């Protein structure tokens, strides 16, 4: 098997074979690197709130077997009665004489269901007169129901299948390591979360929860709830998760 590396030097003309080698190296590497990953966000795609726009940073997304390289993109939002879902959606393909164009764009919808080649970035329920925020006071705050960007359900790709947003597992790990009552398994899992490149595979987190609590958890929401419980048992302050139930609520008004 040959590997052709073109020489970029003065007075050298790139031949057809060399151009094909550049093409294959560029796209073939990414597909090979993430061959064993599931569909979804691979890296990046951080979300920031700027005024009445959501800004999604650069990243990579695995859609089918193709790896999309995503640039920063913005989309407007406004308060609505109900949960809004920010998604990445494949908008089609264009076959041009000089190549193929694969289009992926942002959509903001009221429907939580996802069709083929749709991937959730975040969700939020913004009430009239409130301000949307993406900063969290602690791990429990990540599941707040109202006026808060919720990334727990993000369609992340993980080795062997689905993943869970790195911001979720890293926040959990940082807070867990500050607790008083830890088991040996907690240290290993927390360090793995902090060192993990990309998203932790969902099945790995579910296995940790089962070994730690003896209970089976399935799905990202249930995983988040069980991680909250583990923090409480390890010496954290018990708090209401999900932003529902009784208690004082605070609305940030512009």
Image: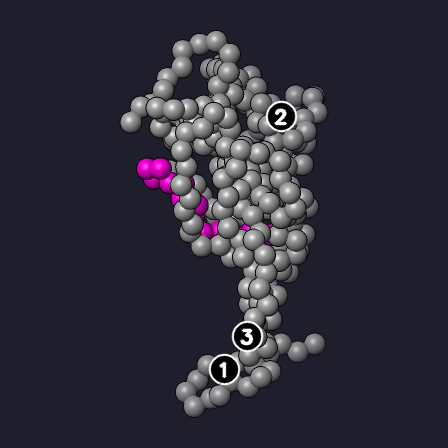
**212 and 150: which one is in front?**
150
- The colouring scheme, among rainbow, by chain, secondary structure or one colour, is one colour
User: How would you classify the magenta stretch by its main secondary structure?
Assistant: strand
Mark 3 or mark 2: which comes first in sequence? 3
Q: Quadrant of the C terminus?
A: top left
Closer to the camera, 131 or 139?
131
- Magenta-tinted stretch: 50-62
Q: Are marks 3 and 2 in contact (CB under 8 Å)?
A: no
> Which residue was labeled with disc 2?
222
Q: Around disc 3, counting alpha carbons within 10 Å, would you say few (fewer than 14), some (14 to 19), or many (20 or more)?
A: few
Q: Which residue is mark 1?
A: 7
Distance of label 3 from label 2 (alpha carbons): 47 Å
In this picture, residue 41 sits left or right of residue 219: left
**Separation of disc 3 and disc 1 at Cα?**
23 Å
Q: Nearer the viewer, mark 2 or mark 1?
A: 2
- Badge 1 marks a residue whose secondary structure is loop
Q: Is residue 92 left or right of residue 56?
A: right
Which residue does the numbered mark 3 point to in the structure image? Answer: 98
Residue 85 locus on image (x, y percent): 52, 35
Which comes before the other along the chain, label 2 or label 1?
1
Label 2 to label 1: alpha-carbon separation? 53 Å
Taking the view exactly as shown, the residue that stands out farthest to the top is: 246
Residue drawn at x 49%, y 82% as measured from the top left: 7
Residue at 54% of width from left, 57% of height from top? Answer: 103
Image quarter for residue 94? Answer: bottom right
**Residue 56 covered by magenta stretch:** yes
Secondary structure at numbered mark 3 = loop
Q: Is residue 46 visible?
A: yes
Q: Secondary structure at mark 2?
A: helix
Q: Which mark is residue 135?
A: none
């Amino acid at each position: 098997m040959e590997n052709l590396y073109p020489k970029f030097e003065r007075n050298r003309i790139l031949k057809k074979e060399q151009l094909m080698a550049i093409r294959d190296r560029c796209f073939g590497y990414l597909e090979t690197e993430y061959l064993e990953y599931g569909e979804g966000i691979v890296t990046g795609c951080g979300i920031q709130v700027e005024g009445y726009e959501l800004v999604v940073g650069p990243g990579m997304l695995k859609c089918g077997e193709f790896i999309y390289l995503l640039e920063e993109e913005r989309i407007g939002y406004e308060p609505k009665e109900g949960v809004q879902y920010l998604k990445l959606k494949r908008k089609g393909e264009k076959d041009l004489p000089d190549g193929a164009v694969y289009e992926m764009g942002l959509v903001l919808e009221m429907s939580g269901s996802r069709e083929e080649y749709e991937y959730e970035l975040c969700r939020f329920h913004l009430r009239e007169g409130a301000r949307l925020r993406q900063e969290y006071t602690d791990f429990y705050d990540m599941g707040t129901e109202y006026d808060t960007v919720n990334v727990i359900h993000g369609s992340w790709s993980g080795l062997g299948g689905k993943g869970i947003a790195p911001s979720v597992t890293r926040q959990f790990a940082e807070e867990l390591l500050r607790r008083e009552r830890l088991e040996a398994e907690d240290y290993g899992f927390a360090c793995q979360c902090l060192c993990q490149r990309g998203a932790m595979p969902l099945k790995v987190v579910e296995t940790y929860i089962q070994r730690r609590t003896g209970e089976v958890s399935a799905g990202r929401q249930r995983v988040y709830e069980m991680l909250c419980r583990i923090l409480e048992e390890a010496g954290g302050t018990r708090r209401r998760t999900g932003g529902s139930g009784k208690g004082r609520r605070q609305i940030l008004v512009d």
